[in-house]
Amino acid sequence: MVGSEPADEIRERHREARERARSMGPFRAWIDGERVEASDGATAETRDPVVDEPIASVPACGPEDVDRAVEAAAAGFADEWSEVTPAERSRRLFEWTDVLADHVEELAFLECLDTGKPRADARGEIEGATDTLEYYASVCRSQSGDQIPAREDVHLFTRQEPFGVVGQITPWNFPAWAAAWKLGPALAAGNASVLKPSASSPLSTIRMAELTEGILPDGVVNVVPGAGRDVGQPLTEHPDVAKVSFTGSTAVGRGVMKAAAERVAPVTLELGGKSPFIVFPDADLETAVDAVAAGIFYSTGEICDAFSRALVHEDVLAEFTDRFVERAESYVLGDPLAEDTTMGPLTTRDQFGKVSDYVDAGRREGATLLTGGGPPDDPALADGWYFEPTVFGDVDNDMRIAREEIFGPVQTIIPFGSYEEAIEIANDTDYGLAAGIGTERTSLVHNAAADLEAGLVYVNEYGPILPEAPYGGYKDSGIGRDLGQEALDHYRQTKTVYVNLDDPSL
Ligand code: TXE
């Protein structure tokens, strides 16, 4: 379904919105507590995916800027942050989240304009980012080491120490949330960060960093925007970056891991997925449709844990498919700045091309296109990277549309006949980020949760993602975990101290 606004209304609203966004700038790199240009003055435009017009120019940084930022981070860590007590770190992180909470609307506006996601979703994302930082501000003070009672004549204990400077790379689909996932545990553990946002949607991250001014010491948070090869790669290769965390594609993640291996730096990788949702025959179909639709159409399908394979038992296949297609057709495509829009455009031209190519591949491979399949037939949306919610039936798990990450609003429906077959198809993928289960039977929930090869299992729902719980994948979907205590542990190293005790006689 498409919104009912005329093209000129949308164009005018976006002209004003881009002007408003620019008035919040200038958007620069944030290094050592200052807004700075790229050393060579290079800039790149970030674009509004609704009308394909430039929003703002942002520095296109390079290796010298990475050096500058790493130096600032090292100084910020050594001079101040490493000396700050956990209680003080917690207080400052809370102070930052208070400021962010006062800027939710502004940040959500930038996120909506830069990524094309509906305003309400962008607001939810910023609130999620703030909540994540609050969680790490809270747990910061409750960390401890161990005392190990191995022998009476040795006082044996562990200290948890930060790495120093960490390099963090985030993607374009959830820029603010990803920045909080990275910065929260890194800062709570006492590190300083150099963070590279995606060149496609850097605005909210830059603004979040600017809002640390006067709260966090200079150099503790640095944001260096630019291209992957110019900023991301030098950051992962930098000898003074002691730990790397990356969210993005599996192909680039492999390269990040290789670069870090050269100097034996630990890495956390959160990569792509091809997550299944299994609709068992006893499932409440309305609940299953809700979960699978949210899992593939939320954020226009540009989500790493998208339920992009719906595995449906043959007894309920016809009814599920009918209801799911109806649901897909009920999404309101329109201007993400309008509150009634439930699906915005894809974020970039590249992503539009990629999704279109997969839909062509699905048709060629013999899947049946049940709805969608291209841009909506509405002249008001013709300038943007809109793509209709798309559903393929008669999908075989060997088809490319069932094996490769499309990262768009494209669902594949794959039938199964038995529990064993469902699990086999679900696990027959290189990825292992998430999996979902639709059933009312407790034994199915627990058996499937144990048998599925995935880092996350959602039962009768898509999400929620909570900062308290670890998030990450099996197999090619990554290594290590974001969120929860586990992420905090990734940003610390353990030092074991043996204090040999003399005989206490005087
Ligand atoms: O990813 P990249 P792209 C998947 C999704 C999407 C595809 C391509 O399928 O269609 O990847 O998206 C930085 N060294 N995901 O091209 O290139 C880059 O600048 C260091 C899933 O955007 O992996 C950006 O900041 N960094 C994923 C980040 O890496 C490099 C989210 C991700 O970009 C680099 C995003 C290099 N050599 C894409 N090259 C998820 N897990 O949700 C690029 N980068």
Image (cartoon, rainbow, N blue to C red):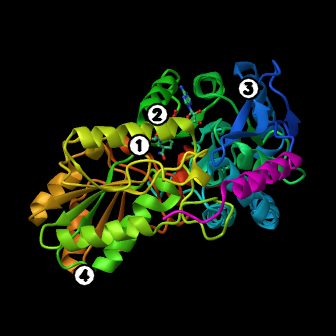
Mark 3 surroundings within 10 Å by alpha-carbon count, few (fewer than 14), some (14 through 19), many (20 or more): many
- The reply to whether the residue tagged 1 has its Cβ within 8 angstroms of ligand 1 is yes
Q: Which residue is mark 3?
A: 61
Q: Amino acid at mark 2?
A: Gly
Q: Gap between marks 4 and 2, in whole Å?
A: 38 Å
> Magenta stretch mostly in which secondary structure?
helix
- Say if mark 4 contacts mark 3, CB within 8 Å: no
Q: Residue 442's x, y, as percent? A: 23, 80
Q: Amino acid at mark 1?
A: Gly
The span shown in magenta is: 1-24
- Say if mark 2 contacts mark 1, CB within 8 Å: yes
Q: Amino acid at mark 3?
A: Cys
Q: Which residue is mark 4?
A: 440
Mark 1 lies on a secondary structure that is: strand
Of the pair 17 and 210, the residue shown nearer to us: 17
Q: Which residue is mark 2?
A: 253
Q: Gap between marks 2 and 3, in whole Å?
A: 21 Å
Q: How many marks?
A: 4
Q: Which residue is mark 1?
A: 478
